[in-house]
Image (spheres, rainbow, N blue to C red):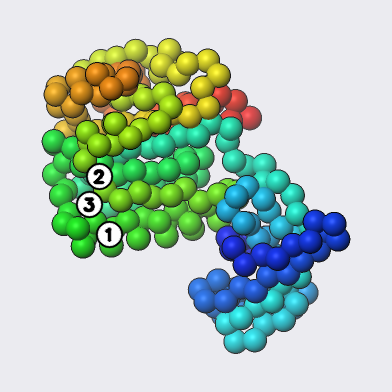
Amino acid sequence: MPRFFTTAIQFDAAAQAGSAVLDGEDGRHIARALRMRPGERVTLCDGAGFDYDGEIESIAGDSVAVRITGKRRNESEPALRVALYPGMPKADKLELVTQKATELGVSQICPVLTARSVSRPDAKAAAKKQERLQRIALEAAKQSGRGAVPAVAALTDFRTAVQNAKGAKILFYEGGGAPLSACLPAGESEVSVFVGPEGGFDAEEVEFARAHGAVTATLGPRILRTETAPLAALAILMFMTGNME
């Protein structure tokens, strides 16, 4: 069933009924791309973890009126909140990471400029990149049935990112570290994951992270690419915490 994120939902909990109007890009997609008709069903999501069962009432141009017939909690959001801090990679690798990390349940994606980052976009290019990544996260959230869209933060420097990170801080280091299974404290509900760019982290960055509460971790004896490591780490974390069941 087509799925749309919107804040235009009006819902009466007592009557278990409501309405919404989808216009702009979502309205155009329903009317022109999907060619849906009144009477067809859609799922609306408020981005706060609730899904709404809807039926199209009318379509006028790019404006779609939806009658809401029920509200339920989304069952796809993981209990573990993971903020991913990928070192800024080259080319379009971050687009792949954003899409797949969203599917795996990441809560936030915070691109980081590190000492070995080859890609160093200026402010204008970085803002454009952030906008594109947010759109990719939105589309991936729709496709995978998420109850919330991960926020893509503005590009920031490594030290600021480490200092602002919340929960358990885990930095994956090719120089060695503890198994991931030993890095997440029991009962922890929030974790910040740092993954280096193509050249990895330099020694000073690793020491700075350790000094600010991060533990270094390993994903095994093989060297994973910068776009592979965060996805492997997310999958393992979700499995460890029962969020893949």
Q: Quadrant of residue 164?
A: top left
Toward the bottom, the furthest residue is 61
Residue 150 lies, in percent from the top left, at: 47, 48
Q: Which-is-in-front pick, marks 3 and 2?
A: 2
Which residue carries the number 1 mark? 127
Labels 2 and 1: the sequence-earlier one: 1
Residue 222 lies, in percent from the top left, at: 29, 22
Q: Amino acid at mark 1?
A: Ala
Which residue carries the number 2 mark? 156
Which residue sits at x=20%, y=47%?
A: 90
Which residue carries the number 3 mark? 91
Residue 200 in sight here: yes
Which residue sits at x=50%, y=34%?
A: 81
Question: In the rendered view, would you say 147 is above or below 240?
Answer: below
Which residue sits at x=51%, y=22%?
A: 188
Q: CA distance from mark 1 to mark 3?
A: 16 Å
